[in-house]
Image (cartoon, grey):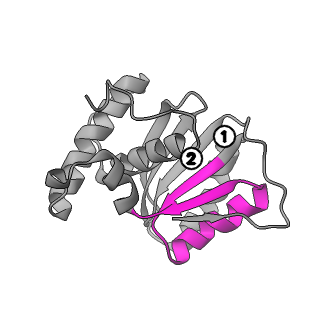
Amino acid sequence: MKIRAAPYIKQRAETMAFLLSVDLGLKTGLALYGRDGRLIWYRSQNYASARRLKSAVYGIFNETSEISRLVIEGGGRLADIWIKEADRRGIRVIQISAETWREKFLYHREQRNGPQAKRNAGILARKVIKWSGAKRPTSLRHDAAEAILAGLWGVIDAGWLKDIPIQIRP
């Protein structure tokens, strides 16, 4: 896990209301959480190129101006696009791997291989959607499901929720 913020940029106050989580890729999963720890919205978007993603990132941050935390699952040059814009806005960035949130939310038997882990992530993400009262999906892409779970990890890490709500994981 990496926590990044440019030292010369004043961080936004933690009283800001939103956490944005991103499952990196040109096919990107996004999830927005409120300060109460509940999922507000989620989506999947295919940007097709790094240039198009770079253009979109600016608009995504403008959609919800009071984001105080960004959780990124993944790394590389696509992560740098998000990090640069977050740094410019004084948003705290936490970069994790899928294993970070999987370790917290999935049993070892639920993640023996990639397809099994993605399937179980989808099941758990649907529980988060239901618990949060967010709009139910007709279909849920794995990148959106993983962004939802990376975001849930982020709100617990931030202390916005103490632990996984019982309605999500009995």
Measure the C-alpha gap from mark 1 to mark 2.
9 Å
Q: Please, is residue 30 above or below residue 27 in the view?
A: above
Quarter occupied by residue 43 = top left
Q: Position of residue 15 (x, y in %)?
A: 74, 35
Kindly check if marks 1 and 2 are in contact, taking CB atoms under 8 A apart as contact.
Answer: yes
Image quadrant occupied by the C terminus: top left
Query: What residue occupies the far bottom of the structure in this picture?
Result: 77
Q: In the drawing, what numbered circle is on residue 64?
A: 1
Which residue carries the number 2 mark? 20
> Left or right of 37: which side holds 138?
left
Structural crowding at the residue carrying mark 1, measured as other residues with C-alpha within 10 Å and reported as few (<14), some (14–19) or many (≥20) = few
Look at label 2 and name its amino acid: Leu
Residue under the point 45% across and 40% down: 42
> Left or right of 100: which side holds 107?
left
The foreground one among 146 and 163 is 163
> Left or right of 22: which side holds 17?
right
Kindly report which numbered mark, 1 or 2, lies closer to the viewer in this rendering.
2
Span highlighted in magenta in the image: 69-97
Q: Position of residue 109 (x, y in %)?
A: 14, 53
Q: Position of residue 132 (x, y in %)?
A: 43, 25
